Amino acid sequence: MRESRSCAGLSFKSQALYAVVYVTRYLDLLWGYSSFYNTIMKLFFIGSSLSILYLMKVKFKPTHDPNIDTFKIEYLLSGSFFMSLIFTYKYTIAEILWSFSIWLESVAILPQLFMLQRTGEAESLTTHYLFALGAYRALYIPNWIYRWLAEGFVDPIAIVAGLIQTVLYSDFFYIYYNKVLRGKKFELPQ
């Protein structure tokens, strides 16, 4: 964004949802310490997501069109909260917020995909960014397999939420592969 001096094509609502994901997931920073690296990474995720919101709302506000970023995130927030109350490992505030962040992360990309659907095309930087977000989540799958085989550990909440998110990205991945990786402009089929 800083290089292009624009946030055109990015959904502010998706970015705001990711900020909520990181803040609710990493609230344990207030009462626990696991390692220096872990603390720095949590602060980086929170800080970078908040700085993106700042850039979109203040610095590059004229380049964002709220008329196409119209997804109703209230449904995602309330659905994720509802799921966190049903599917949690303990009924503590910290655990419910962790579960909420997992469920919300699985659907936080929907406003961006909805915006992409409305415009029908995207800048190269936006498509690469979306691909990186999806690939990041899809790479959790080999991690889950490794942890299951090596440690016998299975986290059903994270697995189901991760699979939901990967499925949501699948159509985007297909178009990304057939268009962007072949040197064409990213446009949705008519």
Image (tube, rainbow, N blue to C red):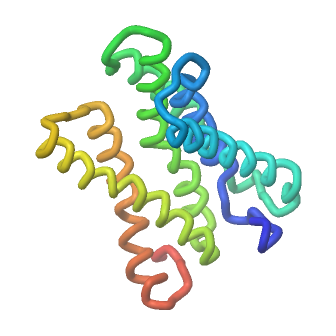
* Residue found farthest to the front: 36
Query: Residue 52, percent across and down?
Result: 72, 51
Q: Is residue 125 visible?
A: yes
Tally the marks.
0
* Residue found farthest to the top: 91
Query: Residue 138, percent across and down?
Result: 34, 56
Query: Residue 174, percent across and down?
Result: 36, 72
Looking at the rendered image, the quarter that the N terminus falls into is bottom right
Position above or below: 98 against 144: above
Residue drawn at x 40%, y 61% is 135
Position above or below: 189 against 154: below
Residue drawn at x 48%, y 16% is 94
Q: Is residue 42 left or right of residue 158?
A: right
Residue drawn at x 82%, y 63% is 63
Q: Is residue 43 left or right of residue 51?
A: left
Q: Nearer the viewer, residue 24 or 106?
A: 24
Q: Is residue 131 left or right of residue 16?
A: left
Position above or below: 23 against 113: above
Q: Is residue 151 left or right of residue 172?
A: left
Q: Is residue 13 visible?
A: no
Residue drawn at x 20%, y 43% is 147
Position above or below: 135 against 154: below
Query: Residue 155, percent across and down?
Result: 25, 32
* Residue found farthest to the bottom: 183
